[in-house]
Image (cartoon, grey):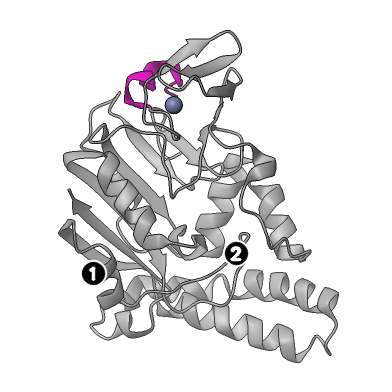
Amino acid sequence: MQSVAHILHTLRCVSCSGNLTKATDGYSCSRCNRAYRATDSCLFVIEPSSSLHSERPDGIVFRLKLWVKKYPKLFTVLNHTLGTYVGKSAKQCISSLPKGSVIVNIGSGAEIIREDIINVDIDPYPGVRITADIHTLPFKDSSVDAVISESVLEHVKDPIRAVAEMRRILKPGGLLYIVVPFIIGYHSSPGDYYRWTTSGMRELLKEFKEQELGIAVGPTNALTYILREWLATLFSFNSNSLYQILVVFFMVLFAPVNLLDHFLKHYASSPVIAHLYYFIGTK
Ligand SMILES: [Zn+2]
């Protein structure tokens, strides 16, 4: 893991764009003197209490997700067994970048894609190096070799601004890896605002040079997602706790069916109802 001290030259003040320097209990801006709290592992550009969590539903799935995010390895295992990822992964995408490249995973949660990655999130999950707001990233212009952001933009109030920020911080020729959802139910994490078609994704990312756009998670996963929500709703008899339990039950039950997407990913019509798309491009 790269420490904040290692990448200090790439960081800037979110108030005035000044340079950050080491202070006694964190960092401070050399221009406007704004102080940034830091622990050994994390720089707090925003404090967790001031983060944008306006909707905190009390659902079992949401709480399970929060709990699982505290255990990065469990999170990765569940992510890969309950859903079937068929696209090029972020890890494959950045495999050609040498060790020590500045690679930022924005909205990382607790997932650690590679040892030298810099995890950025609104909340200080384990492994998060910097807490920040995606609309105002604390990186200098053209300072980063690669930006990764998986299933984050639908939870962002202004994804156009977030994408512009990603482009701003990337070096010319820098790599972008983005995953967004298409056919999926409402899933607060904490908010949930947008979906993209392939055309919508191209429009959102039109300033980047497209290298690849494809299915990350396929149509069977989309179908079982909708089906499990429908079955859980039908058999909940309008009880929210029963609904939450049934969602988890059907999620596990349908997991093997999702494997069909390994075949369907080769079918030309699969993107029509795909669950998630990925996009790889350069600045
Ligand atoms: Zn400043």
Is any part of residue 100 visible from this angle? yes
Coordinates of residue 98 in the picture (x, y in percent): 23, 28
Coordinates of residue 183 in the picture (x, y in percent): 45, 79
Closer to the camera in the image, 72 or 7? 7
Residue at point 26%, 48% (across, down): 167
Q: State which tag comes first along the sequence, 2 or 1.
A: 2
Residue at point 31%, 30% (across, down): 102
Q: In the rendered image of this protein, does residue 153 appear above or below residue 175?
A: below
Closer to the camera in the image, 53 or 254? 53
Task: Identify the disc placed on residue 94.
Answer: none
- Split into quadrants, the picture shows ligand 1 in the one at top left
Q: Is mark 1 on a helix, strand or loop?
A: helix
Q: In the rendered image of this protein, does residue 22 appear above or below residue 59?
A: above
Left or right for 227, reference 28: right
Is any part of residue 94 visible from this angle? no
Q: What residue type is labelled 1?
A: Arg
| Residue carrying label 2 | 191
Rendering quarter of residue 264: bottom left
Residue at point 58%, 21% (across, down): 38
Left or right for 89, reference 281: right
Coordinates of residue 248 in the picture (x, y in percent): 70, 69
Residue at point 30%, 53% (across, down): 164
Quarter of the image where the N terminus is located: top left
Residue, far front:
32
Closer to the camera in the image, 134 or 274? 134
Q: What residue type is labelled 2?
A: Gly
Coordinates of residue 261 in the picture (x, y in percent): 39, 74
The part of the chain drawn in magenta is 1-11
| Residue carrying label 1 | 202
